[in-house]
């Protein structure tokens, strides 16, 4: 089923892309080209910020994808406030909880000692926030890479495996703070820059956008509200250890 949160796929294409394309391969090619065009400017902006904040995450997405989506830089609060978005068994943060999740991730990630010890934990909170209707993976990878750079290390993304990473990330989303994604990422941690941040990110598998999200339903759906509340309870218990 096509991911169609705006409800106008037939007239405006996938997520209202500028070409009004419906073919996923065309949209992904447009996104990839836009990503490659914008990555250096996006990283330069992040590097120049004394402290990373939620607005910098929005700015990163806009820089990467404004050539494809007119709404680039807008979060789900702005363009899909009444929808639950999911991937597999996971409901991403309720629109009203997005900023809370991202702010918490940035707070943790800017504690250099914590970032070095728990890079997967920080990535998990960034991923759970899932601010955008598309382009989340590439956006949060840039933010995460800048947090890592400030903490004095980098991730050798080119040596990671797409399926293995996504499996560990899903487990992290379901039960955070248990070290699942930390354990996966730590063999790929490299001290210092080890080349440019952009090169490391471009080498990452899984940036092809072929793992599409789904509209789970509306935020006033009783069953989904109960599912989300149960998920939140599991996450809180996991965080409490």
Image (cartoon, rainbow, N blue to C red):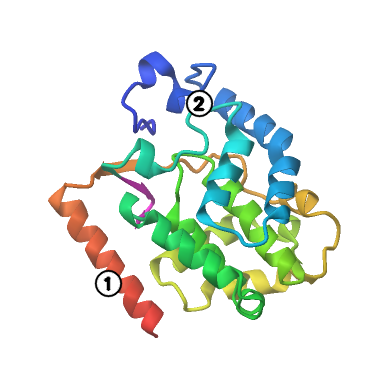
**Residue displayed at 54% across by 64% down:** 106
Judged from this view, the residue extending furthest toward the front is 50
Numbered circle sitting on residue 70: 2
67 vs 97: above or below = above
Q: Quickly name the residue at label 1.
A: 233
Q: CA distance from mark 2 to mark 1?
A: 36 Å
Viewport quadrant of the N terminus: top left
223 vs 79: above or below = below
Numbered circle sitting on residue 33: none
- The question of residue 90 being in magenta is answered with yes
Q: Which residues are magenta?
A: 84-91
For marks 2 and 1, the one nearer the N-term is 2
Image quarter of residue 152: bottom right
**Residue displayed at 69% across by 30% down:** 33
- Give the SS element for disc 1: helix
Viewport quadrant of the C terminus: bottom left
């Amino acid at each position: 089923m096509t991911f169609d949160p705006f409800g106008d796929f037939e007239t405006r294409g996938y997520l209202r892309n500028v070409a009004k394309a419906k073919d996923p391969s065309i949209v992904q090619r447009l996104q990839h080209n836009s990503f490659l065009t914008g990555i250096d400017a996006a990283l330069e902006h992040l590097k120049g910020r004394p402290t990373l904040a939620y607005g910098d995450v929005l700015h990163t997405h806009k820089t990467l994808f404004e050539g494809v989506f007119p709404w680039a830089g807008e979060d789900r609060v702005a363009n899909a406030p009444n929808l639950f978005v999911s991937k597999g068994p996971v409901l991403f943060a309720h629109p009203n909880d997005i900023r809370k999740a991202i702010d918490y991730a940035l707070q943790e990630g800017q504690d250099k000692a914590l970032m070095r010890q728990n890079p997967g934990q920080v990535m998990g909170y960034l991923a759970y926030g899932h601010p955008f209707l598309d382009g989340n993976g590439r956006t949060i990878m840039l933010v995460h890479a800048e947090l890592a750079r400030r903490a004095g290390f980098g991730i050798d993304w080119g040596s990671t495996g797409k399926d293995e990473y996504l499996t560990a990330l899903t487990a992290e989303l379901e039960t955070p703070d248990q070290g699942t994604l930390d354990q996966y990422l730590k063999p790929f941690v490299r001290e210092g820059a080890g080349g440019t941040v952009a090169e490391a990110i471009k080498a990452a598998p899984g940036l092809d956008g072929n793992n599409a999200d789904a509209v789970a339903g509306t935020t006033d759906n009783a069953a989904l509200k109960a599912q989300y509340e149960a998920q939140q309870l599991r996450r809180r218990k996991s965080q409490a250890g």
